[in-house]
């Protein structure tokens, strides 16, 4: 692996959904998540990180140094066990404990960072029964929020098959699903060079992050999610590791406005205009547009 990143980054990420549910809320019957005060749609950071993890696993085959720590049916204690098996000179501590020797404890945590992409990127709490420490990751995302309020639609669906033999006389079984007819979502994220120094997050890792954000929806299609696409990735790169401007000033340079009649619900990306105020870039910050 190459050395860690030396520049701070922020980014604005745009994606949309058409006739799908981008992030169901299990506490609300799997309805699309909404801000109850404004009815703007929400997509959690956890949802977006899951898609990034899945793309990296597809791309790299789940092999070191790009293993995925938090994955479907993953057993975290078994993943943590690998760090001790690959460092046999370090004496195994008691359950839930790190090695008492500080350097040995760092080696265990470092091994996990070196081998698992999502630990290097997002960090992890590895203080399970097999303790590998805690890592604060350099890559963090805010909740995504829709540009306009959304009105989730409940759709009734039918199934010709039945589950149990006793229901054979029924013509069909009924079900329901929720969709958002259309919404454009905006997420904002951060990449800290200083935290990347601790986890070993490299330029190669950073390039994979951008690639995942651009392509991950193409490998995440399902009947529930409908049509989802990445629509814009705007990357702010600072000259320094600590940064040259506050993040909120950079985020304010990206604005989303309706392109047509505001009284008509948006139904496609062409109903919006994305405006980038390049003239307002602070000294020491450059912007790159992808997608």
Image (cartoon, grey):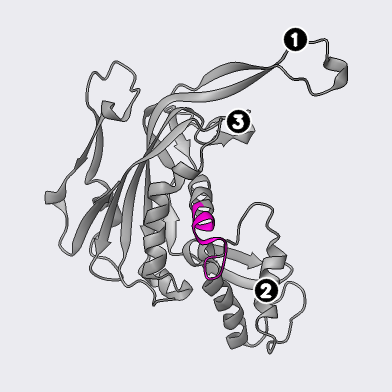
With respect to residue 270, does 65 lie above or below? below
The percent position of residue 103, horizontal first and vertical second, equals 58, 87
Which residue in the protein does label 1 denote? 171
- Mark 2 or mark 3: name the one nearer the start of the chain: 3
- Mark 3 or mark 1: name the one nearer the start of the chain: 3
Q: Which residues are magenta?
A: 55-66
Q: Quadrant of residue 132?
A: bottom right
With respect to residue 14, does 122 lie above or below? below
Which residue in the protein does label 3 denote? 30
Question: Seen from this angle, which residue lies furthest left?
Answer: 279
Q: Secondary structure at mark 1?
A: loop
The answer, for residue 35, to whether it is visible in the render is no
Tell me, for residue 82, which label it has, or none.
2
Tell me, for residue 146, which label it has, or none.
none
* Quarter in which the N terminus is drawn: bottom left
- Mark 1 or mark 2: name the one nearer the start of the chain: 2
């Amino acid at each position: 692996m190459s050395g860690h990143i030396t520049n701070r980054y922020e980014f604005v990420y745009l994606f949309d959904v058409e006739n799908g549910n981008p992030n169901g809320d299990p506490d609300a019957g799997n309805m699309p998540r909404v801000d109850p005060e404004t009815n703007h749609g929400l997509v959690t950071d956890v949802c977006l990180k899951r898609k990034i993890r899945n793309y990296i696993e597809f791309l790299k085959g789940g092999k070191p140094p790009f293993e995925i720590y938090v994955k479907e049916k993953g057993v975290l204690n078994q993943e943590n066990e690998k760090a001790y098996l690959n460092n046999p000179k370090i004496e195994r501590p008691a359950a839930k404990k790190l090695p008492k020797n500080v350097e040995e404890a760092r080696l265990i945590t470092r091994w996990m960072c070196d081998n698992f992409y999502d630990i290097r990127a997002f960090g992890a709490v590895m203080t399970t029964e097999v303790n590998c420490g805690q890592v604060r990751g350099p890559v963090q995302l805010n909740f995504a929020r829709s540009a306009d309020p959304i009105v989730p639609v409940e759709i009734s669906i039918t199934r010709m098959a039945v589950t149990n033999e006793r229901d054979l006389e029924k013509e069909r079984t009924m079900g329901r699903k929720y969709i958002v007819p259309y919404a454009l979502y905006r997420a904002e994220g951060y990449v800290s060079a200083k935290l990347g120094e601790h986890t070993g997050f490299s330029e190669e890792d950073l390039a994979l992050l951008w690639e995942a954000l651009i392509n991950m929806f193409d490998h995440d299609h399902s009947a529930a999610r409908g049509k989802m696409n990445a629509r814009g990735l705007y990357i702010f790169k600072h000259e320094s590791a600590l940064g040259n401007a506050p993040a909120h000033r950079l985020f304010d340079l990206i604005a989303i406005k309706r392109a047509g009649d505001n009284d008509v619900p948006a139904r496609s990306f062409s109903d919006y205009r994305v405006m980038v105020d390049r003239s307002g870039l602070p000294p020491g910050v450059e912007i790159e547009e992808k997608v």
